[in-house]
Image (cartoon, helix red, strand yellow):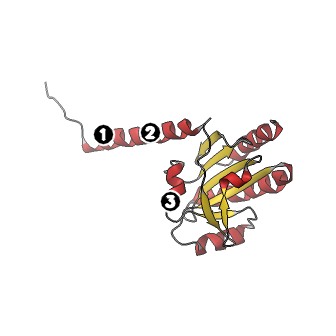
């Protein structure tokens, strides 16, 4: 009988699977906990702090200009923001690119009006265990993480809408 040792390919798959499982586990660990507070520079140059939005439902969307699904998702996020901002909802777009110029252009091209923040050093991304783009986090009025979404495919915005409406209805 020939004994086979794991191939590099199989070892790579196993390590990758464990990394994904760890990422999902870490993201789930955030659900139900206070959202890590942060301060980042915004598109206008002023600093914005997450804790300033206490009492509002907040969506934090981590994105990058090189991310195709992020570009695809932005118009849907803009629609949600415009519709629910008057009801106590805000959306913070956290860009992780090293340079903000591309993010500014992309936001302008897509007609984004929600606040854009820049996390070039990726400190906030680390707080939220962001390992791939996009990641969308929903925070309730009490400042607790309620939902975490990894990735984007057309149709995800329906989940976002349901969750935003649920959180807005809560006292």
Q: Residue at x 53, y 66 (%)?
A: 97
Q: Earlier in the sequence, mark 3 or mark 1?
A: 1
Name the mark on residue 22: 2
Please tell me which of labels 1 and 2 falls first in the chain.
1
Q: Furthest residue to the right?
A: 86
Circle 2 Cα neighbour tier, 10 Å, few/some/many (<14 / 14–19 / ≥20): few
Q: Nearer the viewer, residue 24 or 40?
A: 40
Can you tell which of label 3 and label 2 is closer to the viewer? 3
Q: Secondary structure at mark 3?
A: loop
Of labels 3 and 1, the one closer to you = 3
* Numbered badge on residue 39: none
Q: Residue furthest top?
A: 1
Q: Is residue 95 left or right of residue 57?
A: left
Bin the neighbour count of mark 1 within 10 Å (Cα to Cα): few under 14, some 14-19, many 20 and up: few
Give the residue pinned by disc 1.
10
Dividing the image into 4 quarters, which one contains the C terminus?
Answer: top right
Residue located 63% across and 46% down the image: 137
Q: Nearer the viewer, residue 4 or 19?
A: 19
Asked whether disc 3 touches disc 2, contact meaning CB atoms under 8 Å apart, the reply is no
Q: Which quadrant is home to the N terminus?
A: top left
Alpha-carbon distance for marks 3 and 1? Answer: 31 Å
Q: CA distance from mark 1 to mark 2?
A: 18 Å
Please say if 15 is above or below 89: above
Q: Can I make out residue 59 in this image?
A: yes
Mark 3 vs mark 2: which is more N-terminal?
Answer: 2
Point out which mark residue 122 bears.
3
């Amino acid at each position: 009988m020939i004994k086979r040792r794991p191939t590099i390919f199989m070892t790579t798959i196993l390590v990758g699977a464990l990394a994904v499982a760890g990422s999902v586990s870490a993201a789930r660990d955030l659900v139900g906990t206070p959202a890590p507070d942060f301060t980042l520079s915004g598109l206008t140059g002023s600093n914005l702090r997450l804790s300033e939005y206490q009492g509002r439902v907040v969506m934090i969307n981590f994105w990058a200009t090189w991310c195709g699904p992020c570009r695809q998702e932005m118009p849907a996020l803009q629609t949600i923001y415009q519709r629910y901002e008057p009801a106590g909802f805000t959306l913070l777009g956290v860009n992780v690119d090293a340079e903000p110029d591309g993010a500014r252009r992309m936001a302008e091209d897509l007609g984004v009006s929600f606040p854009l923040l820049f996390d070039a050093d990726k400190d906030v991304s680390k707080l939220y265990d962001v390992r791939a783009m996009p990641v969308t986090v929903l925070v309730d009025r009490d400042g607790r993480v309620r939902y975490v979404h990894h990735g984007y495919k057309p149709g995800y915005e329906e989940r976002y809408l349901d969750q935003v409406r649920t959180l807005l209805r809560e006292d």
